[in-house]
Image (cartoon, helix red, strand yellow):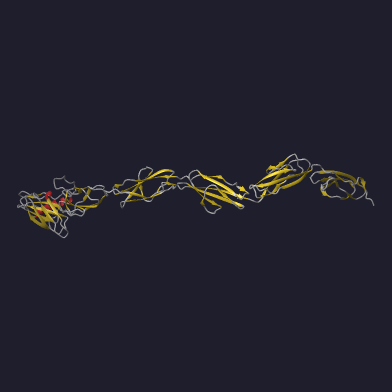
Amino acid sequence: MNERTRRGLALVLLLAAAGCGTGDEPDEGPGQQQPEPEPEPEPGEKPALTAAALLVRMEAPGTADLVLGTAGAAADAERVIVYADAKLEEELVRTPVAADGSFGPVSFGDNAHARIWLVAENEHGLSAAAALENDVEGPILSLQEKPADPSASADARFELACSEADCTFACSLDGAAMAPCAATIDYGDLAEGAHGFVAIATDAAGNESAPIAWDWNVDLTDPVVTITGKPADRSSDPAPVFTFECSREGCTFECAYDGEAFAPCTSPRTQSVTSGEHSFAVRGLAGLSVGEPTSYQWLVDLAGPVVSFDQQPPAHTNEDEAHLAFSCDEACTFLCNVDGAGFAACESPQTLTGLSEGVHLFEVRATDAAGNESERFVRWTVDFTPPTAAFTALPAPNRAAATFEFGCNVGGPCTFTCALDGEEPSPCASPAVRNGLAEGPHGFTAVPTDAAGNEGAAIHHAWTIDTVAPVVSMPDAPTGTTGNYQVTITLVCDEPNCTFECQVNGGILLPCTSPHTMSLSPGPYTLRLVGTDAAGNTGEATAGWTMGAVEM
């Protein structure tokens, strides 16, 4: 090949490598560089390189690459020369071409070339050139179909897909030697347990894909669930706990209450319930196997029994003995506790004797068949001490109506009986009002009785109604004209314990006593005397005189 031909082929290869066309193209615009003209053809028929029939393959690292052409790859050529560069300056190897246009394989280096350039020459020195990629990448293998993990089937199908055309495959099941296989592989009668599948694809250049693997488990046995913990068939537990276990390792569980849909659950399982009949079901899942449900029915009774006292002591009593009777609205057993001594089995009725004074407590606890408990108690007071009463308000004096207020200050609360002026006692309450009282002395009596029935000492109030004004006088008061500059006047009241007030000449009314002495200066005098008896009634008297010349 002469220098001119070599340069022309190098240009073609450079343009091909750059993605440029080499056929007839429009002229470039003004100022743009015009391409170098193609070399003139040499005499004779030009050979051809068919790219589809060319193949380059990289072997293992450190070994040579191979290039070959299948039949028709280099038609009408005598030889094929392999170059390392597009300028066709670095020759790697040359090989003769067979009559059918095939050549090689021939090694040409140590797999350091990702692209090579081939030139075919005939006996006339005419050439054809082609750039060829060195196929060093393995294909990509993928699984388009595979069994589920876990699988409830003893059959398995794998479908392989390769990223390149004309791939071949090799497969292995459960560690067996790799063997050629089709893109679709079916396995049957697989044993229960773990299985593994591996496949490799090889492209037309001999490159192998990365192995692809799939591990799965074949699960053909249904799990069996046993309920190991549950409430009693008649229960008072509002939040019963169920425990359960599975015949298979690695089970998961699904639970359902009262016929609802199954939902994932774990053991122990707690469920809030109401009174009534209930059901619980649990099933196991192992892989794709779903076991038959295990169920349990029970009755929930959350209502405690109703306990009633049919006989009990009054809240306050002066008896040292108490009789109690009690009952339940359903079949029950009883525990009794007296004054905190502790609960002990008992039956109705109960009689308590020798009770001391003070507060007492009787408790009864009933338990029904479901274990529900209810308690009732009776508290009462034993009181042997009589109450003490007192008046808290007395009637105003000299009124025809009298109001008394009274109460127990020890041992209350109390009830009372009352009597006025010796009449027959009758029940009464504070305040007690008595109307239409006559003049004269009166007496009111109240007798207390406490809640225990103890009667206390009577309380009594005596008083007198007096509405008559006292008669007051000044029997020795001067009259007319007197010459004494000092006079002494006796003050008189017809009732005992009167008090006096005196007023001289309309002045201030001042307290005074008998005898009443006055020092006088000449002039007229008027003395007003007011007497008040013990009932508050008042009487008046007046005396008048004139102070004349002083007697010597």
Q: How many marks?
A: 0
From the viewer's perspective, tell me whether residue 478 is left or right of residue 348.
Answer: right
Question: Would residue 270 be found to the left or right of residue 10 on screen?
Answer: right
Image spot of residue 410 (x, y percent): 66, 51
Q: Is residue 107 left or right of residue 457?
A: left
**x, y percentage for residue 378?**
56, 48
Q: Extreme bottom residue here?
A: 62
Does residue 174 appear in the picture of this structure? yes
Work out whether residue 199 or residue 409 is closer to the camera in this orientation and state it. 409
Q: Nearer the viewer, residue 100 or 277?
A: 277
x and y percent of residue 1 in the render?
A: 7, 54
Front-most of 510 and 45? 510
Q: Residue 134 in the image: x percent, y percent?
A: 16, 54
**Residue farthest to the top, as pictured:** 436
Residue 168 visible (yes or no): no
Does 383 sit left or right of 232 as displayed? Answer: right
